């Protein structure tokens, strides 16, 4: 899995690419934690190019979300599609995180 990230104003957009599973989740979580610890307080996770999301991937999102909450910041999910969106809904993560259809919507525009 690759991970791209870019600042859009004061918000960091992190975009994993590929499978977010037991093999890739630790590196993904580490990237999110690193960003939060470096001072990011607005974070959008762009899931548009994730084609598989496992329970380990969900755990990585939850751990980072909890860390962001302790840092008094905001982390949202955006652009999940197909089976990835279904996993988010079935797991109840759409009640844990704000979930937006697009990155632009998550950014408020």
Image (cartoon, rainbow, N blue to C red):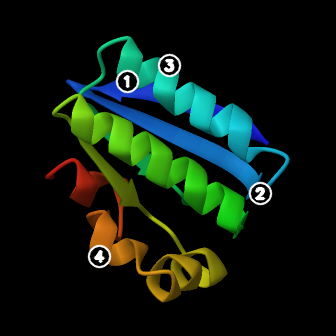
Q: Earlier in the sequence, mark 1 or mark 2?
A: 2
Marks 3 and 2: CB-CB under 8 Å?
no
Residues under labels 4 and 2: Cα distance? 21 Å
Q: Residue at x 24, y 41 (%)?
A: 69
Residue on which disc 2 sits: 21
- Please, what secondary structure does the residue beneath circle 3 have? helix
Q: Position of residue 10 (x, y in %)?
A: 20, 24
Q: Earlier in the sequence, mark 4 or mark 2?
A: 2
Q: Earlier in the sequence, mark 4 or mark 1?
A: 1
Residues under labels 3 and 2: Cα distance? 19 Å
Residues under labels 1 and 3: Cα distance? 6 Å
Mark 4, residues whose alpha carbon is within 10 Å: few (<14), some, or many (≥20)?
A: few
Mark 1, residues whose alpha carbon is within 10 Å: few (<14), some, or many (≥20)?
A: many
Residues under labels 3 and 4: Cα distance? 25 Å
Residue on which disc 4 sits: 95
Q: Judge whether 13 appears above or below 82 on screen.
A: above
Marks 4 and 1: CB-CB under 8 Å?
no
Residue on which disc 3 sits: 34
Residues under labels 1 and 2: Cα distance? 21 Å
Q: Position of residue 54 (x, y in %)?
A: 71, 67
Residues under labels 4 and 1: Cα distance? 22 Å
Q: What quarter of the picture does the N terminus occupy?
A: top right
Residue on which disc 1 sits: 36
């Amino acid at each position: 899995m690759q991970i791209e990230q870019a600042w859009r104003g004061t918000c960091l957009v992190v975009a994993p690419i590929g499978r977010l599973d037991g093999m890739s989740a630790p590196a993904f979580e580490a990237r999110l934690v690193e960003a939060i610890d470096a001072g990011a307080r607005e974070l959008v996770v762009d899931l548009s190019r994730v084609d598989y999301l496992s329970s380990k991937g969900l755990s990585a999102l939850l751990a980072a979300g909890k860390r962001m909450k302790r840092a008094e910041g905001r982390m949202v999910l955006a652009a999940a599609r197909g089976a990835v969106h279904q996993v988010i809904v079935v797991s109840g993560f759409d009640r844990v995180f704000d979930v937006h259809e697009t990155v632009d919507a998550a950014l408020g525009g």
